[in-house]
Amino acid sequence: MSRARVAVVAILFAGGLLAARAQSPAPAPWQDQGPVHTRRSPHARLHDVPVRAVTMQEGFWSARMRANVERSLPTLLELFEQKGIVDNFRRLGGSSAAERRGPLYTDSDLYKWMEATALALQTKDDARWRATLEALSRDIAAAQEASGYINTYWSGERATRRFTDQVGGHEEYCLGHLLQAGIAFYRATGDTRLLDIGRRMADHVVGRFGVDREPLFTGHPELELAMVELYRTTRDRRYLDFAGYLLGSHEAARLKLRPRDVAYTFSGVPFTTRTKYEGHAVRAMYASIGAADYYMETGDPAYLTTLERLWTDLTDTKMYVTGGVGSRAQGETFGEPYELPNAQAYGESCAAIGNMLLNWRLLLITGEARFADVMERALYNGVNSGMSLDGTLYCYRNPLESRGERIRNPWYDTTCCPPNLQRTLAALPGYLYSTSADGVYVHLFHPSTLRWRLEDGTPLELTQSTAYPWEGTVDLAVSPASRTRFTLHVRIPAWSSVSTLTVNGAPVTARVLPGHYAAITRDWQPGDRVRVTFDMQVQEVAAHPQVRENTGRVAIQRGPLVYALEQADQPAEVDLFQMVLTGQAAWQVTARPDLLGGIRVLQHAGAILPDNGIPLYRPGTAALPIARTPAPLTFIPYYAWANREPQPMVVWVPRR
């Protein structure tokens, strides 16, 4: 980075620029809108709680969120400056003479970073970050054409080819992330300047494409969900209708798209004709998210039927035990049913985030805990593994087995995953709770205080105290402003086979079933206390018989966390891939506050199987040597692997 550029970044982070007056009237109360604003969605059972309404106390996720704000956001912005990503906009605005750098979709990476920063502002206002977003918004505004068009790649000498490559051009994808960034900044501050930029580009697209106009399909879905959220924010029906056009289009025929492109992009044909997940995993997830958002506003039953069919296909045959999705590196695609390799697993971080965000929408639609269970699995494992503990290194792919290759890096030319992880962590407070017509839901467990209101307007304070996910007890202090009758819905995770629930020390009559919400309806008053205790026994998980690579193997899970063996924790000079789990002794759970940011390690009896003298092939009737050397196996949470020197790791362990 040049000295001049370093000086600019330093000035921005030091503050000194104040929020400018919003350039258009506020279309809706920005303080009350959560990450997915469903308050007025007629077909959403659950309604959003804004990020700012939840205060996160010290716990499992607060450390990750702190690393996100203190290390991840500033270091990635500095890399964006070094790599010319921000200068791509300044070049078009006339304040930089630099050549455009990076792949054609880099605009979206900066937009996602801006969304993450805006979401962080919703937790804690910071003049430095406001100033940074304002300055970047000015750079983007200066690059926008009078027509509303904004894209740094498809400009200049490429302007005549705009929207000619709808399979791989990413123009709509970039617009989708611009809209989400603008909405997040508006919800953080009430400032509409970035939202106005995105809306002008959205108007350009809506005015040019659609039914009886030029054809458009999203080669990389993302615009669908962004258009629905833009509708929720502005109440301009054109945006919702355009999302419906994209989801229900028959543009494959009009654009003469190849069937393989339609399958790969998960677009171009009516969403409701889909029967299975195929093609690019992230694109398929984002298309489904858009479809779920569209259903919440329209109630078209064909969409919900399709989403249910696809969800079953995903969770029954194509999802990793970590909640990751997308098994093939070639094309970043889904494989066939039960094609879930370990070492070759792709499991892109963005795909796991897509899985989480899809299940969040399905949870909002139905209020069913099965979707929260999948969301939690993806969040704690397949998403959480994507960023290093210090917040400066990232996994693009998340395999379940490694021979020791370097998996975490500070930079990828395709920089989609780092800011996607950042915005997910920044939005976390908005996923803990929801309201409904009959009360309030508790989805995820973390020390926190909700200061919000019931849907009848009664102010409510709800405080969680817990050491989750390390321990299984969650205490809830329920304090409505006055004695009020409502239902408190507390999720009982599917992995907790035996759970207990008390109110003010007495058992409750509510059904407490794994994989459901326990519904406690009563007259609540300030000072009421709820305690729920989950079964934290270590579980050995077996895969479906058709996942052939895992025959004779188990994965280890405790609470929501999937565990793994990493070489550094095993006896010296032992080959990790010769180790097997043996015996029926009890699992040992040990707190290690000194290790990997503070974790619980699991230990169990194991053995080292010899490989000397065993031929590569032998008669099927010939027995293997039974001699083996006892050795303890030590497991760490999967999310924490690859935070030391690169070394072997395995999730699925042979069981003898």
Image (spheres, rainbow, N blue to C red):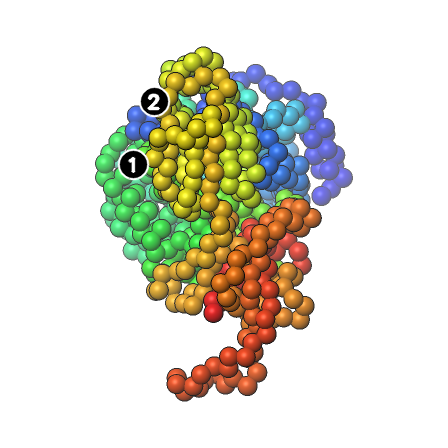
Give the structural element (helix, strand or loop) at label 1. Answer: helix
Residue at the right extreme, as displayed: 3
The residue singled out by tag 2 in the image is 437
**Labels 2 and 1 touching (C-beta < 8 A):** no
Residue 404: mark: none
User: Looking at this view, is 647 or 632 the one in front?
Assistant: 632
Residue 231 horizontal/vertical position (percent): 37, 26
Q: Which numbered disc, 2 or 1, marks the residue closer to the eye?
A: 2
Marks 2/1: CA–CA distance = 31 Å
Q: Quadrant of residue 490?
A: top left
Crowd around label 2: few <14 · some 14–19 · many ≥20 (10 Å): few
Residue with the most extreme top position: 482
Amino acid on which disc 2 is placed: Ala
Image position of 95 with respect to 632: above or below: above
- In the image, which disc is placed on residue 245? 1
Residue 343 x, y percent position in the rendering: 50, 64
- Location of residue 184 in the rendering, given as x and y in whole percent from the top left corner: 50, 29
- Give the amino acid at mark 1: Tyr
Q: Could you tell me which residue is drawn at 65 percent across and 20 percent down?
A: 18
Give how far across and how far down residue 192 sits, in percent: 51, 22
